[in-house]
Image (cartoon, rainbow, N blue to C red):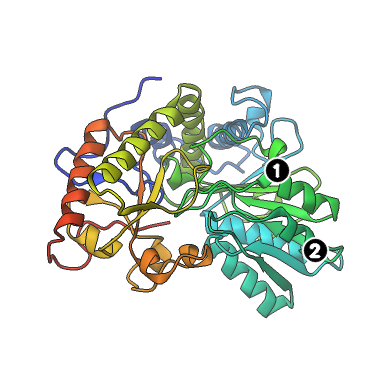
């Protein structure tokens, strides 16, 4: 596909923090702009001004569903319907204001709608939006929460999930890909175990969507979260896939929008942005984008290991997102490394923990000691990353590792989930 010029400016730091947030693709901006101007109508309005926004909402749902392997993104007669039902009239795409909101809707909604099931199961390296929701469900609703361990690669052992499941389990939540290490969980097998006990399975696919192919049905996801600003749409929009027949308690009550699960007049412009981003992501995957970025990631890893023999240690495993490289470099903390390399915008972990000197909870849960965890940096590539960017970043990081400069804390850092 034709990719427009990068929105990143020449001379700025090399941007290697795409797992935190992505630049907004100019084609996404172009698609959403009409709904900030002439297409301002309320999609619930029956008059002419509601027609185009209503059709745009339905089209965006189809586009998101298509990225998840559900139907086609092409418009048809269903595009005049504003409801959240998917292209087959069953599965729903519910637009939310963030991935955190979608995760809250999935977990809280599933538990409160369950008949007598009060157990929630998750795992130790989940995003805080899942872990904190589980804690709140325990505190406010008496839910029993089980948090499964991970091994040194960051993987859940299916045997641990099997041992934790019983007929009291309402929902199991395991992410598709970790935001710090990129580790890909064995989601399909875990979902089968959950279903064997009558539990729902939620998958936070915020980091995976658009970076690797996803088929929600093959994964076995009853609920799946997808986030706009991880795939070149603006911040402030996400979606929750809700499989046909799944009952959820709404998170926001009101006028009945989004199938009654999320009241409030829909932000059509942002929904259009997410739908367009989904189309572009599908085209990028079909065109070999994941392979291209994976080769660049490996080039960066190779540059570092060759220049710093014996000092560079991969955190996670080979079964990970093609854009993600999390490494610890002996002899320097990740914070000091990035401070000494202001020409590289990367992170030491997630934005939820930025500004602290504690080791990453993700890496600690994987069994890494504090020294190695504090030495970690996450380098995440994206759509406009080039070989020249990789080589420039490698030179800066190698120079910083060999002779860290005493620059003020915080320079060159763009941490984020």
Residue at disc 2, secondary structure: strand
Q: Secondary structure at mark 1?
A: helix
Q: Position of residue 298 (x, y in %)?
A: 37, 37
Asked whether, in this view, residue 18 is left or right of residue 269, the answer is: left
Task: Look at mark 2 in the image and give the residue it sits on.
Answer: 169
Viewer-nearest of labels 1 and 2?
1
Query: Which one is in front, 91 or 315?
Result: 315
Question: 312 or 282: which is nearer to us?
Answer: 312
Check the picture and name the quadrant holding the C terminus: bottom left
Reply above or below: 71 against 352: above
- Which residue is at a point 80% across and 63% down the rendered structure image? 169
Residue displayed at 77% across by 64% down:
164
Q: Quadrant of residue 360?
A: bottom left
Q: Which residue is mark 1?
A: 188
Cβ atoms under marks 1 and 2 closer than 8 Å: no
Q: Which residue is at a point 58% across and 59% down the rendered structure image? A: 151
């Amino acid at each position: 596909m034709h990719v427009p010029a990068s929105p990143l400016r020449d001379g700025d730091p090399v941007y290697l923090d795409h797992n935190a947030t992505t630049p907004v693709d100019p084609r996404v901006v172009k698609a959403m702009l009409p709904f900030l101007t002439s297409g301002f109508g309320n999609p619930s309005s029956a008059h002419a001004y509601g027609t185009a926004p209503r059709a745009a909402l339905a089209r965006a749902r189809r586009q998101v569903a298509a990225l998840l392997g559900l139907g086609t993104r092409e418009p048809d007669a269903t595009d005049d319907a504003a409801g959240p039902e998917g292209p087959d009239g069953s599965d729903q795409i519910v637009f939310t204001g963030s991935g955190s909101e979608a995760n809250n809707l999935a977990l809280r909604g599933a538990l409160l709608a369950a008949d007598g099931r009060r157990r929630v199961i998750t795992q130790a390296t989940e995003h805080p939006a899942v872990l904190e929701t589980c804690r709140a469900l325990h505190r406010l609703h008496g839910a029993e929460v089980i948090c499964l361990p991970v091994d040194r690669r960051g993987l859940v052992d299916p045997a641990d999930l099997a041992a934790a499941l019983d007929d009291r389990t309402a929902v199991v939540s395991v992410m598709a890909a970790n935001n710090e290490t990129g580790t890909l969980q064995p989601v399909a097998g875990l979902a089968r175990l959950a279903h064997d006990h009558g539990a729902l399975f939620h998958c936070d696919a915020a980091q995976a969507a658009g970076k690797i192919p996803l088929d929600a049905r093959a994964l076995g996801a009853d609920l799946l979260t997808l986030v706009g600003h991880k795939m070149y749409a603006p911040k402030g929009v996400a979606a929750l896939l809700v499989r046909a027949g799944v009952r959820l308690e709404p998170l926001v009550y009101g006028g009945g929008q989004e199938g009654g699960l999320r009241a409030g007049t829909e932000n059509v412009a942002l929904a259009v942005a997410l739908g367009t981003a989904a189309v572009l992501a599908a085209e990028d995957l079909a065109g070999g984008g994941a392979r291209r970025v994976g080769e660049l990631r490996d080039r960066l890893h190779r540059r570092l290991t060759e220049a710093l023999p014996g000092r560079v240690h991969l955190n996670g495993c080979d079964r990970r997102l093609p854009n993600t490289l999390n490494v610890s470099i002996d002899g320097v903390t990740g914070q000091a490394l990035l401070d000494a390399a202001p020409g590289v915008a990367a992170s030491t972990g997630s934005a939820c923990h930025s500004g602290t000197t504690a080791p990453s909870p993700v890496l600690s849960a994987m069994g890494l000691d504090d020294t190695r965890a504090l030495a970690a940096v996450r380098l995440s590539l994206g759509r406009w990353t080039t070989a020249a960017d990789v080589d420039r970043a490698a030179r800066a990081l190698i120079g910083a590792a060999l002779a860290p400069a005493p620059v003020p804390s915080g320079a060159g850092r763009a941490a984020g989930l």
